[in-house]
Every structure is written in structure tokens, then in C-alpha cells.
Image (tube, rainbow, N blue to C red):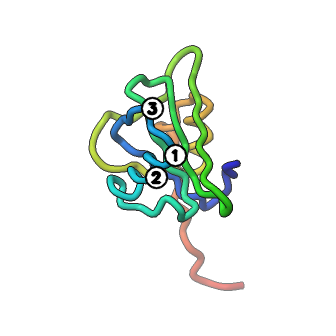
Amino acid sequence: MIALRPGLKVVLAAQPVDFRKSVHTLSALVNEALRANPYCGDVFVFRSKRADRVKLLAWDGSGMVLVTKWLHQGHFTWLPVRDGVVYLSATQLAMLLDGLQWTRVSPEPVKRPTVVG
């Protein structure tokens, strides 16, 4: 199971992938194309060419987890297709999976306190 916790690093592959890819092939894609370690505990998100499907890949400490979701109506909100990756917060990932407009939400910057007490 993938726990959506604060501080979770979510990496969205900007290019669509072939949804016939398995856990092993997606892990290799994370390593080679995204230049990341698939066993680091981050969540890697892959989009299909059709906008109604998403795959999540994550290492949970004891094994690799692969989650696939199809929307029966509508589509997921995606940024324009380009090279590279997009980093999401756990909240943005939850909104994406719910089919909401996650691209319109951005966290407010919080200034670090300079005085203690």
C-alpha cells in the first residue's frame, strides 16, 4: 500500500508510457529515463497516452507496489506532454487520483521562524 504522508516525494513522468509495461520495466524506466532509484521510497507516477489511466510505482520496504487506476468517465488532469519530470506534493497526488484539477493548487510558502521563543 502507498501511504500518502506529508513529505512524500512524488515524481510524475511527463512523457506517456505504454501501459503494457510491467513492474520490472517501469522500475528500469525510473532508473534510466528519470535518473532515480526506484527503491528509494518515492512514488513514481506514469500516464497513459489516453488521459484516463495512471500507474503508480513505489517501494514500500518489503516489495514493489504497482497501482493502476482507470477513470470510467472523464479524464485525469495532465500538464502538456514534454520531456523530464514534474514533482507533486502528496496532496496534489491525492487530487490527481480523485480526478480533480490539481494543477490549480499550489502550497503557500511558509517563512522559517528566525526567533525562538
Residue bearing mark 2: 27
How far across and down, in percent of the image, does residue 68 sit?
Answer: 58, 34
Q: Residues within 10 Å of mark 3 (few under 14, many from 20)?
A: some
Number of marks drawn: 3
Label 3 sits on what residue type?
Answer: Phe
How far across and down, in percent of the image, does residue 26 sit?
Answer: 45, 46
Label 2 sits on what residue type?
Answer: Ser
Q: Give how far apart the Cα atoms at labels 2 and 3 are.
A: 13 Å
Q: Nearer the viewer, residue 85 or 2?
A: 2
- Residue at (67% x, 85% y) in the render: 116
Residue bearing mark 3: 19
Label 1 sits on what residue type?
Answer: Val
- Residue at (27% x, 45% y) in the render: 83
Establish if 27 lies above or below 21: below
Establish if 32 lies above or below 16: below
- Residue at (49% x, 23% y) in the render: 52
- Name the disc covering residue 23, or none: 1
Q: Give how far apart the Cα atoms at labels 1 and 2 are.
A: 6 Å
Q: Are marks 1 and 2 in contact (CB under 8 Å)?
A: yes
Image quadrant where one finds the C terminus = bottom right
